[in-house]
Image: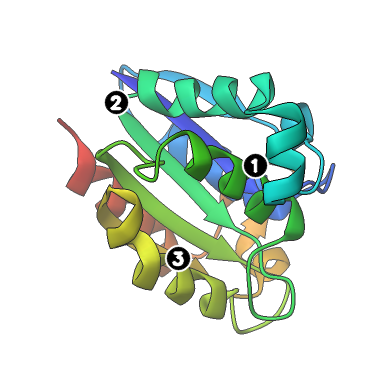
Amino acid sequence: MKVLAFGASSSKNSINKQLATYTASLFDKATIEVLDLNDYELPLFSEDKEAEIGKPTLARDFFEKIGSCDILIISFAEHNGSYTAAYKNLFDWCSRIDMKVYQGKPAIFLSTSPGPGGASSVLSLAQESSSFFDVNIKASVSVPSFYDNFDMESFCINNMEIKKQLINAVSSVVL
């Protein structure tokens, strides 16, 4: 079983990437690949740019990574109530390859933020639009107050209620 995980953020210290990585580590006997969106930096999408350069190799590579996994874990960072520009841009390029960006993969959608909202606005947005992009959401979890609920030294969730939610999310996806 191959699990593909990433934080939908370009921050080098992304707490969403940390949450996605931690959640992926809860799978037994899985090959885990964690992506960094910085490895898929693309020009700002527009129809004019697409006509000029076509479909960039990095967008194709990202799309193929999704296609090659068995389970997808995405932790969405929230900028002003929506997706980060880095994720939205990469997603837009991938949707020009195929609108079924998630290729029917079973997925866990996550979000977190330093504040009490846990980036729940962007998580809700991702869930609402998911049917257009062919994803099979098995579970979604918003983690509020990341720094209060995640032990940076041991790299794990220290809030037992949230940890249980993540374990249940993983259990809901196991093939």
Q: Which mark is residue 126?
A: 3
Q: For the residues carrying marks 1 and 3, which lies nearer the camera in this image?
A: 3
Q: 154 or 165: nearer the eye?
A: 165
Q: Is residue 76 visible?
A: yes
Q: Nearer the viewer, mark 2 or mark 1?
A: 2
User: What whole-number distance in Å separates the C-alpha atoms at marks 2 and 1?
Assistant: 24 Å
Which residue type does callout 2 highlight? Asp
Crowd tier of the residue under label 1, counting other residues whose Cα lies within 10 Å: few below 14, some 14–19, many 20 or above:
few
Q: CA distance from mark 3 to mark 2?
A: 20 Å
Which label lies toward us, 3 or 2?
3
**Rendered-image quadrant of the C terminus:** top left
Percent from the top left, x then y, of residue 2? Answer: 36, 19
Residue identified by numbered label 2: 70
Q: Identify the residue at horizontal 49%, vertical 44% (top origin).
A: 95
Question: Would you say the residues marked 1 and 3 are in contact, meaning their CB atoms lie under 8 Å apart?
Answer: no
Q: Earlier in the sequence, mark 2 or mark 1?
A: 2
Who's the residue at 59% across and 49% down the image? 92
